[in-house]
Amino acid sequence: MLFGKKKSVAGLDIGSSSIKMVELNGKADNLNLVSLGIQNLPADTIIDGQIMELNTVSDAIQSVCNSSSVSSSSVVTGVSGHSVIIKNIVLPPMSAEELEESIDWHAEEHIPYDLADVSLDYQITAQSSDATNVLIAACKRERIENVRQAIQLAGKEPVVIDVDTFALQNCYELNYQPDDSTVVTLLNIGASTMNVNIVKGTRSLFTRDITVGGSQFTDAIQRNLGLSYQDAEAIKRGVPVGSDAVDEKAIEPLMNNVTEIVAMEIQKTFDFYRATSEDNQTVVQKILISGGGSKLQGFAQDLSARLELPVEVLNPFRNITVDNRKFDYEYINDIMPEMAVAVGLAMRGV
């Protein structure tokens, strides 16, 4: 059809504890929120990024689409975790054609899997007379097929499979429009995985996925206070559970211990970047946090004190028009940190 309404594409973030969906329309400099929704998943539905219960996930995707009136039949989704390899590599000066012919050969040095078993993509991030800087991303094909099956079972079609880390970066670039000298760390804290991305301007300098997340706070409370998973999860979020057996004074040290682990992992990431990079001038100016784990009371302030850096919650709707007659302001504000990756994915569909 030559003329007609452009089909919309929704952003679908399949996390280990919930499904998030965002639909946008408009142009890159004038986006509007069309629909959004979130649906929690039962524990162990997804383990280390691998979907263990396809039907449960597909039912959740259908549910969030129906309850949020998501009209799109096509989605952009993302992957993260150990099956995803992201590397910044420096190659000799070469043309785009020469790089395309030789990328597999260069990638073999940096990807610990047989190239026949992965989907590979790359992007030139900088070029000079001395070097060609290339970002390569690879993901195991079985992992991509796993995600594709769950989406297709829900009656949707995955048109792009992105990397969560870069979806978050797209969301950041749209909403914060950084200049070339701005250096931030984007920290997405999911239930079981934490995505770290050091970004200078619009260029990703270093990425790392860490198997630490919000569920570790829950585990620490559950294990040490002898509570059920539901009660531990509620306490983590600051919700009273009505039990006299809970020692309020014991909760804060447990939360602090996990926050210390998070801070140490971030500091290790900074140290590793400095040790492996020739760039000694880059200094992180701020950390922007997102994901369900970023909503914990006092977490941003505690992390800021430990790392001696400003820490703030990333607002994925900062430069997106949200109609307050259609969307409840308090609800949007409450789920805002969890929707950042889904917003970045939805941008690919606009």
Image (spheres, grey):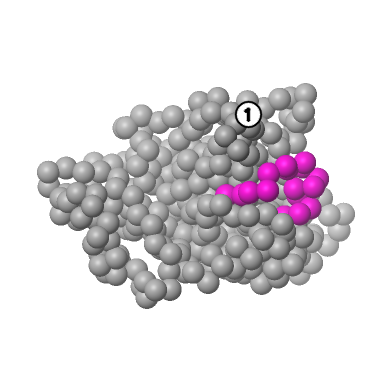
**Residue occupying the far front of the picture:** 1
Residue at x 61% of width, y 49% of height: 75
Range of residues picked out in magenta: 61-76
Q: Decide which of 186, 298 is in the foreground and name it.
A: 186
Image quadrant in which the N terminus is located: top right
Q: Secondary structure at mark 1?
A: strand
| Res. 313 visible in picture | no
**Tag 1: residue type?**
Asn
In the image, 243 versus 59, the foreground residue is 59
Is 277 displayed left or right of 285 in the figure? left
Quadrant in which the C terminus appears: top right
Picture layout, residue 210 above or below residue 174: below
How crowded pointer 1 is (Cα within 10 Å; few <14, some 14-19, many 20+) is rated as some
For this rendering, which residue is in front, 4 or 220?
Answer: 4
- Residue 177: image quadrant is top left
Q: Report x, y in % for residue 17.
A: 68, 59
Q: Residue at x 70, y 70 (%)?
A: 53
Q: Is residue 129 visible?
A: yes
Q: Is residue 346 left or right of residue 113?
A: right
Residue 300 image point, x, y percent: 56, 42
Q: Residue at x 36, y 46 (%)?
A: 204
**Magenta-drawn stretch contains 326:** no
* Total numbered circles: 1
**What residue did someone put label 1 on?**
32
User: Which residue is nearer to you in this view: 245 or 15?
Assistant: 15
Residue at x 36% of width, y 29% of height = 179
Q: Position of residue 48 (x, y in %)?
A: 57, 68
Q: Position of residue 303 (x, y in %)?
A: 51, 46
Q: Quadrant of residue 50?
A: bottom right
